[in-house]
Image (cartoon, grey):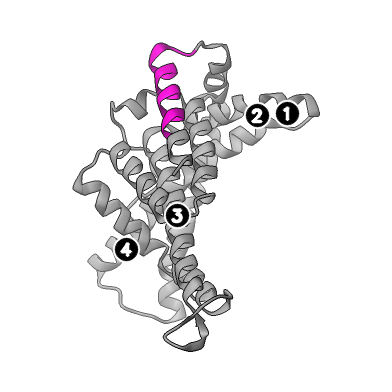
Amino acid sequence: MTEGAYRPGDSFLHRTDPRVKLLLLLVLTVCLFSASSPQRLLLIFCLWFAAAGGSMKALLDVWRIIRMLRWLLFFTFIVHLFFTPGHTLLGVRWISYDGLLRGLMIDAQLVLAVLFSLLLAWTTRPEALAGGLSTLLAPLQKLRIPVREAGGMLLLVLHFFPLIQSEVTILKSERQESRIRSSGIKGWLSSVEPLLTRLFDCADQLAKDIASGSMVLANAMDQKEKAFDRHTLMTSTFGLLIIFTLWQV
């Protein structure tokens, strides 16, 4: 399962300029974490569900993300439940009703933030995403900040994470086929050693591809010279109107 991998498609989000998606994600994240009512969070989730296609597959994605973050969500909820001052719950002094509500709100905000970030990754190629971010941060080059090098590192990371997930999946299938059930140190080393070797080879080849120009970041950064088309302008306007409307809830 490659949660953060690019998913090819031809939706309106796939066709939207990555710079616009990054800016909308930033504004939407501020709107999300400034929410003080569950109604706004519900409307933001409906917005994500519609943007994700409104299918059962989108709901399955939500469930997988919740499972992936379950321990973070659980401890966040517990901390707020026990340490948030306010009204008590069921007459127990060390359990806060206000903490219960606050913990659920924080968990919902975290899940929605991850879902929107993944939606950006699912609909934007890694090189376009890295190029768009580098373009937005290009003014920082006047302060001698290595924006282009940082964009190259981001491109490397975005390509490498799916490789890690795929290699771990291959390792699991190989262990099942060979029926390796040893839980000792020798058994784990026999499995981890070839995994690390393949990952080092993949990382080396990926770095060579980027350095040789097979995945050129400069081409993606040339977006700063590309004018926004009609579709991008309409998407930007519509997205800002939706976020502004949500901010009033």
Quarter-of-image position of residue 8: top left
Frontmost of labels 2 and 3 is 3
Q: Which residue is the site of mark 2?
A: 137
Frontmost of labels 4 and 1 is 1
- Which residue does the image show at 58% across and 77% down from the upper left? 83
Q: Is residue 129 left or right of residue 38?
A: right
Disc 1 vs disc 2: Cβ atoms closer than 8 Å? Answer: yes
Q: Name the kind of residue labelled 4 in the image.
A: Lys
Q: Position of residue 23 (x, y in %)?
A: 53, 31
Label 3: state its secondary structure.
loop
Residue 213: tell me if it is visible. yes
Q: Which residue is the site of mark 1?
A: 140
Q: For the view shown, which residue lies furthest in the left direction?
A: 56
Q: Name the kind of residue labelled 3 in the image.
A: Ser
Position of residue 127 relative to residue 65, above or below, is above
Please provide the residue range marked out in magenta.
228-242
Counting other residues with Cα less than 10 Å from the Cα at mark 3, is it few (<14), some (14-19), or many (20 or more)? Answer: few
Q: On residue 30, which mark appears?
A: none
Q: Which residue is the site of mark 3?
A: 37
Nearer-N-terminus badge (1/3): 3
Q: Which residue is the site of mark 4?
A: 172
Q: In this view, does 41 lie to the left or right of 98?
A: left
Q: For the view shown, which residue lies furthest in the bottom direction?
A: 92
Question: In which quadrant is the C terminus drawn?
Answer: top left
- Is 238 within the magenta? yes
Counting other residues with Cα less than 10 Å from the Cα at mark 2, is it few (<14), some (14-19), or many (20 or more)? Answer: some
Nearer-N-terminus badge (4/3): 3
Label 1 and label 2: CA atoms lie apart by 6 Å
Nearer-N-terminus badge (2/3): 3
